[in-house]
Amino acid sequence: RRETMRNLLELLVVWICSVQGVAVVARAGRAAPQMVAPQLVSSVEPVVQVLCAAGLSEPQAQEVWGRRPPGRLPGIVQQVALIEWLQLDPLAGSNMHTERLLYMALHASPKLMLYAGKLPQLKATLEAVRAALKELTQRQLALTLAHNPGILLLSPADVELRAASLQKATSLDAAELTAALSAAPRLLLLVPEQIEARAGWIRSRLSIQEGELRRVVAKAPLTMLAKTSSFESRISMLASLGLSESLTSLLVVRSPRLIHFPAAELLSRVDWLRQSGVARDEAELASFLSREPDFFNVARSVCEARLAWLSGTCGEPGAPDTEGAAAMLRAEPRILTQQSEALQLRAELWESMLGGSSADLVKVPHLFTCNLGRTVLLRKAYCLLAGVDVAPVDLLVKDVSCFCADVAGCTEKELHQFEADGNHLRLFSAL
């Protein structure tokens, strides 16, 4: 392609010189000599021919030319240099043919043709963009610039100013800023005033503080680009489920991608909670989500697998207890976000070390979310050394004072001193 472009450039230069020679001879009243490159003298604009040589079809080239900005454009030599640079640098490296990306870029931003005489500035801007979007591969950068060629029209100073404005408005650290811009490059097309206004609107609409806004933008930078109507529609949808404004804000802060969730997917997630029996009405739904606001960050397949595992774990062999598993998730929603390996280890500890039955697991769902060292293991060690025979479910009595008075027969002070002395750790180390 480079050789083709150079050959065409040579022909065009000869053609331009010939046209100038014809004009001079005509003014002198002499007959015009024959054109050196007659194949280029036609009704087709030189830029159109250059675009065709770069791989565009003639209709595509004519369409781009028809969208050219008004006024005088830089000369044909500069246009050739621009097109060659676009194909060899910013739009290179994609699986798509560069001519397709070139067409997309010039069609979306024909103003690039005005910048053909400012190639050094374009190159400097590209380097500034690469620095701001450094998490993108060259392929990703090429696709980004093909879809958002207006980024190249910024000055290097503009790129740096807009990145700095986003960081100031959202309190992102350097790594978060790079990640956010790489995930949503169109943020560079917002002027500082738009960035500040958008950040302020989100804070106000969700009634959140700067630290919470930072989380929203870091987790879902496209939120800064979401249309107000899209934002409002998701808020309204969550409110229609019977959720309070404060809970809705919490869910968006914890799962900012809710703003971009397809409506059908969001409703499907809620339907799963209802159909599985985990949240059977609005009150249970609100209670569940308030205690596990990260629910929408967990894939539905993971939720289904976790419910199936619990059903088998708390049921009898060959007879999974689906209702019991749903009740456990309803009581301890955070089971959904625990690591599978950790859950399996706790289930084995329940049966092998504590001697608990699978049927009794339904009574102690917090076994899977509590601090084992400060509850189960501490209490088991105390009872062993004190000679107290205790049922496995009683080791998980939630209230410490009730455990001490009704199960262990001690005071809270005695239990805390036992823990402070590290007696439980020495016991289990010996075992």
Image (cartoon, rainbow, N blue to C red):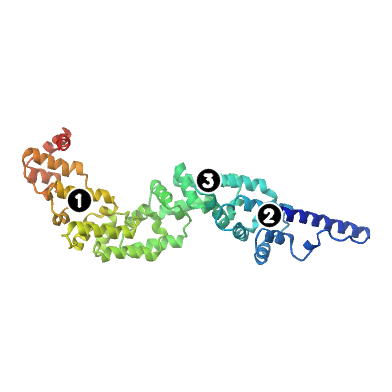
Mark toward the start of the polypeptide (2 vs 3): 2
CA distance for labels 3 and 1 = 48 Å
Residue 73: x and y in percent read 72, 56
- Amino acid of disc 3: Ala
Question: Which residue position is annotated with label 2?
Answer: 114
Which of 8 and 261 lies nearest the eye of the viewer?
A: 8
Work out which quarter of the rendered image holds the C terminus and state it: top left
Residue in front for this viewpoint, 293 or 136: 136
Q: Amino acid at mark 2?
A: Leu
Mark 2 burial class by Cα count in 10 Å: few <14, some 14-19, many 20+: some
Left or right, 298 with respect to 391, comes to right
Q: Residue at x 63, y 53 (%)?
A: 87
421 relative to 167, above or below: above
- Do the CB atoms of the residues marked 3 and 1 lie less than 8 Å apart? no
| Residue placed most toward the observer, 114 or 351 | 351
- Residue under numbered circle 1: 347
The x, y position of residue 346, in whole percent, is: 21, 48
Q: Residue at x 44, y 55 (%)?
A: 223
SS type, badge 3: helix
The residue at 18%/47% (across/down) is: 349
Q: Where on the picture, by quarter, is residue 79?
A: bottom right
Name the quadrant of the N terminus: bottom right
Under mark 1, the amino acid is: Ala
Please state the horizontal and vertical placement of residue 272, each as a whole percent of the image. 29, 64
Q: Tell me which residue sits at (5%, 40%) in the image.
A: 387
Q: Secondary structure at mark 1?
A: helix
Judged left or right of residue 260, residue 136 is right
Circle 3 crowding by C-alpha within 10 Å: few under 14, some 14–19, many from 20: many
Q: How many marks?
A: 3
What residue is shown with label 3?
A: 132
